[in-house]
Structure formats: C-alpha cells, structure tokens
Image: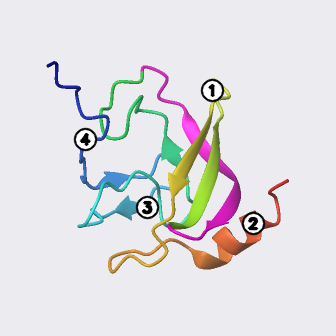
Amino acid sequence: MELKEKRFRKNDAGFICANCGLAVLPLGTSSRNHCPRCLCSLHVDINPGDRANPCKGILRPISALPDAKKGYIIIQRCEKCGEVRRNKAAYDAKVQPDDMKLIIALTANHR
C-alpha cells in the first residue's frame, strides 16, 4: 500500500509583509500565511506550507465569507497570475489577530 504525501506542511515562520511592511509574528498554532493588518499574502504555496509555487506575486484580499466551521475565509487574487485562493482568517489569534473591521468590510464584496 502506497502512502500519500501530506498536502499540508506546517510552516509557522514570521515574515515581513511584502505589501505593507508589517513584521508578522508566527501564529503559534498553525501556519500563518497572510498579514493581519492588510490581509495580503505571497503566492508561494502550491499546497499549504510547501513554498513550491514559482509565482511569488502578492495575493490581495478581494472578499471574505463567513464559514460556520472556520469563522471567516478570506478570498485573495494574485496580482501577478490572477489565481484566486481561499485563506482561513486568524481574527481570533492570540498574537496579532487579523483586522476584523477589514474582514467584515470584505464580506460586502462577495457576490
């Protein structure tokens, strides 16, 4: 029996936001992959945490969806390649929680 490789790799390192310059601290419980201030990410993953995507464009938030199990999902679009990605919000994080006002404002953009 062949074992499948895990699709999620924990990668909870801090980083400097490429969009707004905030020093983003590790989340501590899971992989943080977006800025809590501007909700932007870098398009670096094919599967969560693998850092294998050659694109490296900025993923900008375009909308947000409430989710009964996950809280809120941030929808982002890559400014370089146009790919749309979904990203679980960390609005309840103990360290640098996501900007809840921005998340709520983004829910109005969902169609």
Q: Which mark is residue 22?
A: 3
Label 4 SS? loop
Q: Is residue 85 above or below residue 17?
A: above
Q: Which mark is residue 9?
A: 4
Q: Nearer the viewer, mark 4 or mark 1?
A: 4
Label 3 SS? loop
Specify whether 78 is left or right of 28: right
Of mark 2 and mark 4, the one earlier in the sequence is: 4
Q: Nearer the viewer, mark 3 or mark 1?
A: 1
Of residue 3 and residue 47, the one placed in the foreground of this image is 3
Which residue does the image show at 46% across and 55% down from the upper left? Answer: 21
Whether residue 19 is visible to the viewer of this picture, yes or no, is no
- The part of the chain drawn in magenta is 54-69
Identify the image quadrant of residue 22.
bottom left
Circle 1 is placed at which residue position? 80
Q: Which mark is residue 107?
A: 2
